[in-house]
Structure formats: C-alpha cells, structure tokens
Amino acid sequence: MPKILITGSAGFIGAYVVGEFLNAGWDVVGIDNFSKYGELRPAYSDHPRYRFVRGDAKDVDLLKSLLLDCDHFLAAAAMIGGIAYFHALAFDLLAENERITAAAFEAAISAHARGSLQKVTVLSSSMVFENATEFPTPEGAERRSPPPSSTYGFQKLATEYFAQGAFQQYALPYTIVRPFNCVGIGERRALADHEVMSGNIKLALSHVVPDLAQKILKGQDPLHLLGDGSQVRHYTYGGDLARGIRVCVEHPQALNDDFNISTATPTTVLELAEAIWKKVHGASKPFHYVSDAPFPHDVAFRSPSVEKSKRLLGFEAATTLDEILDEVLPWIAEQIKLGTI
C-alpha cells in the first residue's frame, strides 16, 4: 500500500487532501503545528491508516525521519491567508514560507538519495500568475510573465524554482500543482487575523466566498464589495482540488511537470455575490451593493487554462458553483453561530 507524507495536513486544503488519499487506499502521515487555526480534530483523526504528528514543517530532521518509509511527499505546508495577509504580513509570508520550502526540499533530497522517496509534489499557487497577460493562462506563462508583485506570489514561484534546482542538481523527481481559489468547508478565523472591516462587518478570512457569505448571512444591506465586482476567479471545490492533487501524485504523466488544477468556469465577484444573495434571501429581498476600495494585490483577472490536466491526466473539476454554495453556506451559517467566523 503506498504511503505519503503531507505537511500542513490540518490546514483548509490539507484536510480535503488527507481525506482524499485515505479514501483512495493510501497510508497517510500528516504533520502540522496548528499555527493557523489552533488545535483541530478532523473526522479522519482515528482512521487506521492515518498517523498525525504535531510538529514544525521547518524541522528538517523530523521530516527526514517521517520520510524514511514514505513513497511520496506532498509539500503543502505554508503560511497562507486571504488577500489581507499579502499586505499585513508581507515579510513574514516571504521569510517563513522560504524556510518551510527549504526544509521540505532538504528532507526530500535526502530521502530520495536513500532510495525510499519516489517523488516530491509541491503545492504552488495561482498567485504565480499575478501579473499574467495570457488568458486562459497556460502552464509556462509564469516564466513569460512579469514576476508576481506580492511577496506571497513571488515566494510561491520560488517553490517552483526549488523543484527545478533539486531536479537539476540531485535528480529529485517532482510535480508542481497550482490550485485555483479553493472553496469548501473548514475555513475558520485564523489566529493571526488582523481586523479588517467591510462596511459594518469584520472580514472573516479575506477569502471572497466566506466573507461575502457571512456578510449576507448577517444581513448586511447594501452588501460591501472590495472593488467593483468585475474581478474574475475560478472557484474550485476543495474535494475536486484534492482529487486533482492525488492524480498529480499518482499519474505517470505528471512526473517532472506542472499543472493548473482548477474548475474551467470563470465567475466575477459580482456574479458570486448575487448567487450567494439569492441562496440566502431568495426573491424576497432585492440585491444592493456598494464598492469599497480594493486591496492593491487584488488581481483583476485570473483565469487558468485547464487543458493540460485534462489532456495528460484525465482530470476535470466538475463541481459547479451552485453545488459548492449549497454545501458551504449552511456550514458558514453554523460557524457564525459558533463564533469561529
């Protein structure tokens, strides 16, 4: 039975990914230090094929020991948050994530040299395309585009160069995965959240779906949007994203290559806001909104090409935004009652 080490296993995306690998029959070792949300106990905690280690993903010796009998390594740990993080924690995002990335690759190079580790799969980000000018943006455009303006985007691009360097110097096999706008259940207010007001309501995460949802569920009217609402994103269900990551780990065509993992459907923030409003209020309450000043790193248009993952891996993210909202909105409503958002 194959075995994988997943760093950042208690994170928002990490929780979906751990469940996906367990359901697919893998043995999973997860490591997390609970630095983002505090201590959590996910549903799979007692799964017989899951081992959780509370520890720091920057601890190279710990990672080396955990990789001793692992076939694969998903380097997913990172200091990450919504767009407010890009400004409030601009240096920390760069410095801390660089340390995490360096530790992951040092451990992976060592494990591969011993003959145990087959490949490292690196979780990058759509933010590497922050200044892209090609749309839909294909893999490879990150090298042709101006570099990301945000320190977060720049560091995620650096993780891809870590993969390049480790392959060129140490022949470490790799796959690079770029997720686009993960949406699902499990996001909570982070311990390091700064207070950011949007009208009369404090933003939960500066991630657009939970923030719009909580404002609408709390009755904000008119709804405050960051920017004019024309920003385009591809909202990808966490379960689809996790499946895409697993396929990237498993598929032979993913070896030493990079993939955008995303829904193919573009949606403007205004379209998203109206969809959530109608889910919550139905036809009984007309939709009103006002525009507030956007954050500087709020990319106006982000739209990936997903042709490569479909052609080479047979992967498509099929869950619609309507289906996502039907699952996510009741969960956010419950979290509002519990005070976690």
Image (spheres, grey):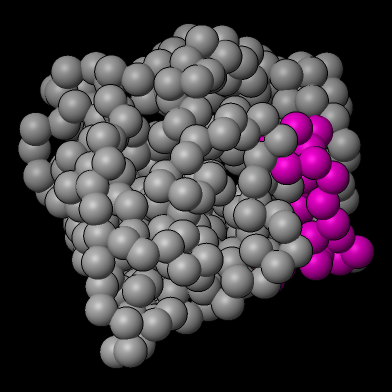
Q: Residue at 26% of width from left, 35% of height from top?
A: 293
Characterize the magenta stretch by its predominant secondary structure.
loop
Across and down, in percent, residue 121 comes to: 53, 38
**Quadrant (top left, top right, bottom left, bottom right) of the N terminus:** bottom right
Viewer-closest of 328 and 54:
328
Viewer-closest of 172 and 23:
23
Across and down, in percent, residue 201 comes to: 50, 50
* Left or right placement of residue 3 versus residue 336 in this view: right
Q: Residue at 42% of width from left, 45% of height from top?
A: 198
Across and down, in percent, residue 78 comes to: 59, 30
Q: Residue at 28% of width from left, 18% of height from top?
A: 149
| Residue 37 painted magenta | yes
**Can residue 158 be seen at all in this image of the molecule?**
no
**Quadrant (top left, top right, bottom left, bottom right) of the C terminus:** bottom right
Across and down, in percent, residue 98 comes to: 55, 14
Give the residues in magenta: 23-47
Which quadrant holds residue 8? top right
- When the figure is inspected, residue 287 is found, relative to residue 36, above or below; the finding is below
* Left or right placement of residue 19 versus residue 220 in this view: right
* Left or right placement of residue 160 versus residue 54 in this view: left
Q: Residue at 25% of width from left, 60% of height from top?
A: 289
| Residue 178 painted magenta | no
